[in-house]
């Protein structure tokens, strides 16, 4: 009986699941905080609605979403590329000018964030034609990005099963999202 349990625990699959479970326990407190997170205070009251209304593309500010794993958040120099040419002063734009003068990256607070034991990459999703909106909501109606509820494992799996049935085995394989 004892030996059976030891053999069971030695199976690679079982070990992977245990490792994930331990990581989940260790990271549990932090993940809980993301899930329940309310709209955080951002360093600058950035308005998505205004900038998207001007015709600025998502990928101009978040180019990594197309090229790779993480979408990335714009630095002060990306904002300044436009704003140094715009003659307008507001308290929020003064903050931007201050970050530029100090040479400090704007410390944006993330609202869409997976725990460390999850592997997610934007690239395959954008390549397959999944819209930003499907996962992040309609940013053209938001100022700062609002956290979306329910971006959990069930959500990932539901879409993977529906969208690519012929690739189902790979897309729902534990190792695809837990490496
Ligand atoms: C493609 C050019 C462009 C980029 C890039 C850009 N902006 Fe703007 N932004 C504008 C324009 C145009 C306005 C409107 C100015 C006006 O109303 O006179 C504006 C307005 C604003 C305002 C004032 C809005 C208000 O509440 O009145 C803030 C704050 C602002 N931008 C912050 C940022 C930040 C932070 C970034 C970088 C993440 C950024 N912008 C990137 C073009 C840009
Ligand atoms: C299939 C769902 C999905 C789609 C489609 C998607 N995202 Fe994401 N996005 C996520 C997830 C999940 C995270 C959290 C990633 C993490 O923490 O590892 C995220 C994180 C982000 C972040 C935070 C910064 C970062 O680099 O992690 C930005 C910005 C972002 N996405 C922008 C976009 C844009 C722009 C598009 C469209 C071009 C897009 N996303 C499409 C699911 C998606
Ligand atoms: C002019 C630059 C600019 C454009 C255009 C822009 N964003 Fe953003 N985005 C930002 C900034 C700055 C932040 C950080 C502040 C915040 O959370 O709103 C951000 C944050 C986000 C986040 C939250 C990521 C995180 O940190 O968790 C998502 C998701 C996102 N943007 C999606 C989009 C999508 C989708 C579009 C196009 C429909 C878009 N953005 C267009 C500048 C931009
Ligand atoms: C709205 C649908 C949708 C959601 C939600 C979604 N995905 Fe995907 N995912 C896809 C599609 C479509 C592909 C590309 C499949 C293909 O290339 O045929 C993909 C591919 C992937 C791949 C690459 C698989 C490979 O072939 O190597 C990973 C990793 C991945 N997704 C992780 C995630 C994670 C983690 C989540 C949740 C945080 C998630 N996905 C949520 C639709 C989705
Ligand atoms: C398409 C992506 C994807 C696949 C495939 C996937 N997971 Fe997950 N898993 C996630 C995400 C995202 C989370 C974090 C969010 C959450 O806890 O729901 C997670 C969380 C977990 C957790 C932490 C539990 C918790 O509630 O915090 C465990 C354990 C886990 N996964 C095991 C597995 C096992 C075992 C498999 C294979 C049968 C698997 N996962 C397949 C995306 C995936």
Image (spheres, rainbow, N blue to C red):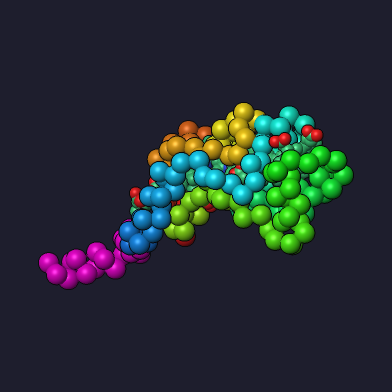
**Picture quarter with the N terminus:** bottom left
Q: Considering only vertical position in the picture, is 146 above or below 10?
A: above
Question: Quick one: 44 or 120, which is closer to the camera?
Answer: 44
| Quarter residue 16 falls in | bottom left
Magenta highlight range: 1-21
Question: Quick one: 57 or 111, which is closer to the camera?
Answer: 111
Q: Where is residue 86 in the image (x, y as percent from the top left)?
A: 85, 41
| Quarter residue 98 falls in | bottom right
Q: Find the residue positioned furthest to the left.
A: 1
Tell me the residue at 36%/55% (across/down).
28
Q: Is residue 19 a member of the stretch shown in magenta?
A: yes
Ligand 2 position by quadrant: top right
Q: Considering only vertical position in the picture, is 27 above or below 147?
A: below
Residue 22 vs residue 143: left or right?
A: left
Q: Where is residue 45 in the image (x, y as percent from the top left)?
A: 64, 41
Q: Position of residue 71 (x, y in %)?
A: 64, 49
Q: Is residue 109 a member of the stretch shown in magenta?
A: no
Question: Quick one: 129 or 84, which is closer to the camera?
Answer: 84
Question: Quick one: 157 or 50, which is closer to the camera?
Answer: 50
Q: Considering only vertical position in the picture, is 91 above or below 5?
A: above
Tell me the residue at 24%/64% (across/down).
8
Tell me the residue at 35%/62% (across/down).
26
Tell me the residue at 85%/40% (across/down).
87
| Main SS class of the magenta portion in the image | helix
Question: Is there any visible trace of residue 30 in the rendered image?
Answer: yes
């Amino acid at each position: 009986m004892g030996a059976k349990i030891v053999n069971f625990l030695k199976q690679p699959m079982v070990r992977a699941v245990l490792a994930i479970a331990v990581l989940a326990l260790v990271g549990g407190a932090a993940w809980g905080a993301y899930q329940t997170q309310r709209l955080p205070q951002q360093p600058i009251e950035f308005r998505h609605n205004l900038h998207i209304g001007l015709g600025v593309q998502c990928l101009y500010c978040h180019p990594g979403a197309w090229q790779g794993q993480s979408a990335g958040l714009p630095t002060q120099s990306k904002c300044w590329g436009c704003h140094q040419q715009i003659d307008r002063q507001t308290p929020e734009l003064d903050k931007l000018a201050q970050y530029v003068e100090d040479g400090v990256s704007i410390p944006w607070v993330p609202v869409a964030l997976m725990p460390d034991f999850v592997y997610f990459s934007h690239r395959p999703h954008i390549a397959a034609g999944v819209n930003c909106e499907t996962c992040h909501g309609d940013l053209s109606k938001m100022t700062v990005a609002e956290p979306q509820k329910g971006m959990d494992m069930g959500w990932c799996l539901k879409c993977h099963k529906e969208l690519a049935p012929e690739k189902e085995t790979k897309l729902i394989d534990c190792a695809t999202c837990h490496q």
